[in-house]
Amino acid sequence: MTVTRFAPSPTGHIHVGNLRTALMNWMIARKSGGTFILRIDDTDAERSKEEYVDAIRADLEWLGLTWDREERQSARLDRYAAAADALRAQGRLYEAWETPTELDLKRKKQLNMGRPPVYDRAALDLSEDEKAALRAERGDGVWRFKLDRARIEWTDGILGDLSIDAASVSDPVLIRADGQVLYTIASVVDDTEMGVTDVVRGSDHVTNTATQIQIMAALGHDHPRFAHHSLLTGPGGEGLSKRLGSLSVRQMREAGVEPMALLSLLARLGSSQPVELRDTPEELAEAFDLSTFGSAPTKFDEADLRPLTAEVLQRAPVAAVDADLAAAGVPEEMRAPFWAVMRENVGTRAEIAEWWALARDGATPLVADEDRDFVAEAFGMLGEPPYDASTWSDWTGRVKEATGRKGKGLFKPLRQAVTGRASGPDMGDLMPLLQAKPKL
């Protein structure tokens, strides 16, 4: 069975980069009838917050990305300790005490000598007395995994055949001096023990994947199928790292972005397939094809979400927006006819209330100075509501006959005066919705 996972750290809100990773893994699982695990990476007790765990769940539920089971890494510390003990027994995990300043000086020296800036494994040459002295002086050290300095090769689901020389990579730290287990080993243990078969993540994890393949092998496990998707950039190719906070799922939801607009865009970004709005996440999964994705940086433009969100609402039946109509104050008997007229003109659900306020109370007229007398005369020729489907044509016909205006000079000033807007629904359809006579 296909098993995938999404492993967010509860140190903040999910942003578009996180969501793209989650969505790809979710679609792989759902397309194959497999299992999708939500795995909370909360080994950093100081930075992890329960409020963010709740927010992650809420965001995924809003998007319709359901999970089959949830795991908490903080509940699996004994499994990581057992793996670390197994690596120590093999001589593959060793303690080191260099300070950040010392490591930085070593890197600079190696670069000046034209060598890769990798850790020199000085800790392996320490005697037991030297280790004891360092432990007494500096406390516990970090624990590094001793890489087998050979080439690490695998076939990536997006990038194709990859090969990384482990001699060009520093022995990764798996456990910090304060005892915190880091992602590199926690993910290895979880992926292997939970039977994860497919892992899709960002291309910034390629080197990390290489080291994890060796750790898995040292623990006696085969590695899952890895695929590394391209990283998102801004519309001009700029990095998103400084903007990710403003691109959180929560903020997009608050801005009125529809779930399927966001998912439909992210499901195809970076692939050779065009973005197509789908009605459900399951439809996206059915059409998902990992082989269509490339390695080039992928541009993400928030502006692309606006027309997709509008399209979602244009497709929505009245039942799908009934709660929004009710919240806006639209009477139950008016909801179906109101939505039939407004669905083509609403960009977000928040605009429903704006259009109903116009229909109920009237708008602030938008009138050019040169049209003020004309509009006043025309409004004097309009009766009181209720209006019907023929009101607009009958009224404008009388105004045309009385004033001699026609075409754009007739219709545009009246539309703007009635609605306070330069565009909107067909006026013949709008007039029956008006609850109050327009006034200057």
Image (cartoon, rainbow, N blue to C red):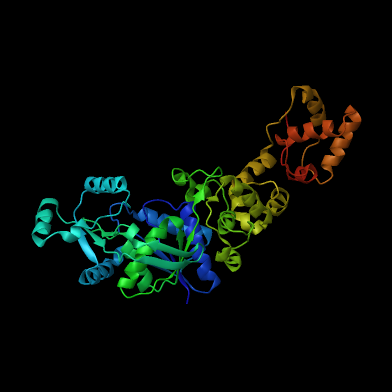
**Does residue 177 appear left or right of residue 348 in this picture?**
left
Question: Percent from the top left, x then y, of residue 436?
Answer: 72, 38
- The image quadrant where one finds the C terminus is top right
Residue 198 in view, yes or no:
yes
Q: Which is nearer the eye, 183 or 349? A: 183
Q: Which is nearer the eye, 134 or 331? A: 134
**Does residue 386 appear left or right of residue 29 in this picture?**
right
Above or below — where is 384 with respect to 265?
above
The number of discs equals 0
Find residue 174 and report its image quarter: bottom left
At a point 77% along the width and 40% down the height, the residue shown is 385
At a point 55% along the width and 49% down the height, the residue shown is 299
Find residue 54 and report its image quarter: bottom left
Residue 348 in view, yes or no:
no
Above or below — where is 66 with respect to 435?
below
Question: Percent from the top left, x then y, of residue 7?
Answer: 40, 61
Find residue 101 and report its image quarter: top left
At a point 38% along the width and 69% down the height, the residue shown is 191
Question: Percent from the top left, x then y, of residue 12?
Answer: 39, 51
Q: Which is nearer the eye, 4 or 348? A: 4
Q: Residue furthest front?
A: 113
Q: Residue furthest bottom?
A: 1
At a point 53% along the width and 53% down the height, the residue shown is 296
Question: Percent from the top left, x then y, of residue 83?
Answer: 27, 70
